[in-house]
Image (cartoon, grey):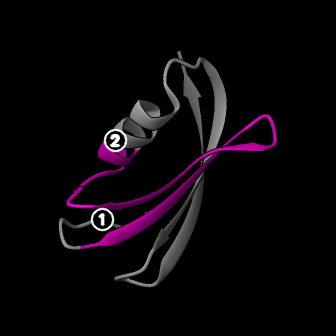
Amino acid sequence: MNTITLNDIIFATATIRGKVAANLRLSGLASMSEVIRAVRGEIGSFSGLMTISLRNMSQGWVQQKSVYLA
């Protein structure tokens, strides 16, 4: 798993049912759970399957995760 540090710049795209629900530029986060919390705060109350695409500009990696929100 790729790591996230406080100094990283993360671009996160949340996709729900094939449609982009949020595009975020994040920094000052130190974990994947903080990224998910930030995305959830942006999209509001949603329950179901969401795909988050992450691009870490600082470290140069790309990752995609499927997350079930209840």
Q: Is residue 58 above or below residue 38?
A: below
Between discs 1 and 2, the one toward the N terminus: 1
Identify the residue at image location x=18%, y=65%.
6
Is residue 42 located in the magenta-colored stretch of the structure?
Answer: no
Residue 46: quadrant of the picture: top right
Q: Where is 38 relative to 45, above or below?
A: below
Q: Main secondary structure of the magenta part?
A: strand
Q: Nearer the viewer, residue 18 or 65?
A: 18
Q: How many marks?
A: 2
Q: Horizontal and vertical percent for residue 52?
A: 58, 49
| Residue holding disc 1 | 4
Query: For residue 9: magenta?
Result: yes
Q: Is residue 33 above or below residue 6?
A: above
64 displayed left or right of 54: right
The numbered disc on residue 63 is none
Specify the amino acid type for callout 1: Ile
Q: Is residue 2 visible?
A: no
Badge 2: how crowded within 10 Å, few (<14), some, or many (20+)?
A: few
Q: CA distance from mark 1 to mark 2?
A: 10 Å
Q: Helix, strand or loop at disc 1? A: loop
Query: Is residue 60 or residue 14 the one in the foreground?
Result: 14
Q: Tell me the element at label 2.
A: helix
Residue at the image position 49 percent from the left and 24 percent from the top: 44
- Left or right of residue 19: residue 61: left
- Asked whether residue 7 is in view, the answer is yes
Residue topped by disc 2: 33
Sort mark 1 into few (<14), some (14-19) or many (20+) by Cα contacts within 10 Å.
many
The answer to which of 58 and 44 lies nearer the viewer is 44
Whole-percent x and y of residue 19? 77, 42
* Label pair 1/2, CB-CB below 8 angstroms: no
> Residue at horizontal 45%, vertical 32%?
40
The segment highlighted magenta reads 8-35
